[in-house]
Amino acid sequence: MLAGGDRRSIGKSEAVVERLESQPELLRSLVKLLWDSDPKVSMRAADALEKYSRNQRQRLQPYKDQLMGLMSECTQQEVRWHLAAIVPNLRLTDGECRRVAAILESYLQDRSSIVRTFAMQGLFDLSLQEPLLLPLVTDLIRTLARTGTPAQRVRGRHLLKALESKAL
């Protein structure tokens, strides 16, 4: 369902998400596809996993170590930006939060603007779980809201407003 077609297409990843809703036992197979040798398959698996995780975050918890490992070693931009959206929303220990924060900080140097923008959002999401990261994340977001790509500046302003309302 995830093979073939153009790399600019998400293929049938929406259908995969629907199938996972009724057959959650297929999740293990989807996670394995993140390491597929076909970049179209791995990116579509990441897309489907991110969409599934929006409503089924707790089901990904058993795969936390695998996802964090892939996050640190993956070079494929499409997989990286999806992992930046997924992993910070899992339940993480303090040490895991620091590890993920370091990975996301490295993503801020990625050549892909989308990866950098998702990394910024991921750091924000992570700081909601680990308040000790908040000063660092706030400084990064302030800087990127001024100096980043257009997408980072827009996202940065949005995140700064969210931080302000959280502080009230």
Image: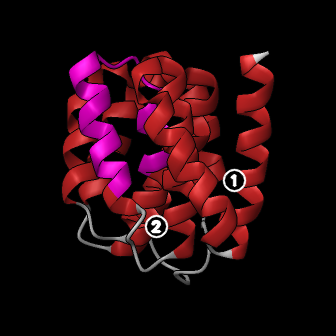
Please name the amino acid that badge 2 sits on: Glu
Instruction: Kindly report the secondary structure that dominates the magenta region of the rendered protein.
Output: helix
Which residue does the image show at 70% across and 31% down from the upper left?
163
Does the magenta segment cover residue 34?
no
Q: Tell me: residue 135, above or below residue 43.
A: above
Sort mark 1 into few (<14), some (14-19) or many (20+) by Cα contacts within 10 Å. Answer: many
Q: Can you give x and y, in whole percent of width and height, for residue 159 in the image?
A: 71, 42
* Secondary element type, mark 2: helix
Which kind of residue does numbered mark 1 sit on?
Gly
Q: Which residue occupies the foreground of this view, 86 or 123? A: 123
Taking the magenta stretch, the answer to whether it contains residue 84 is yes
Q: What residue is disc 1 on? A: 156
Residue 160 image point, x, y percent: 72, 41
Q: Is residue 130 visible?
A: no
| Residue numbers of the magenta segment | 83-105
Residue reaching furthest bottom? Answer: 6
Residue 30 rendering spot, x and y as whole percentages: 38, 43
Read off the residue under disc 2: 78
Instruction: Tell me which label, 1 or 2, sits earlier in the chain.
Output: 2
SS category of the residue bearing label 1: helix
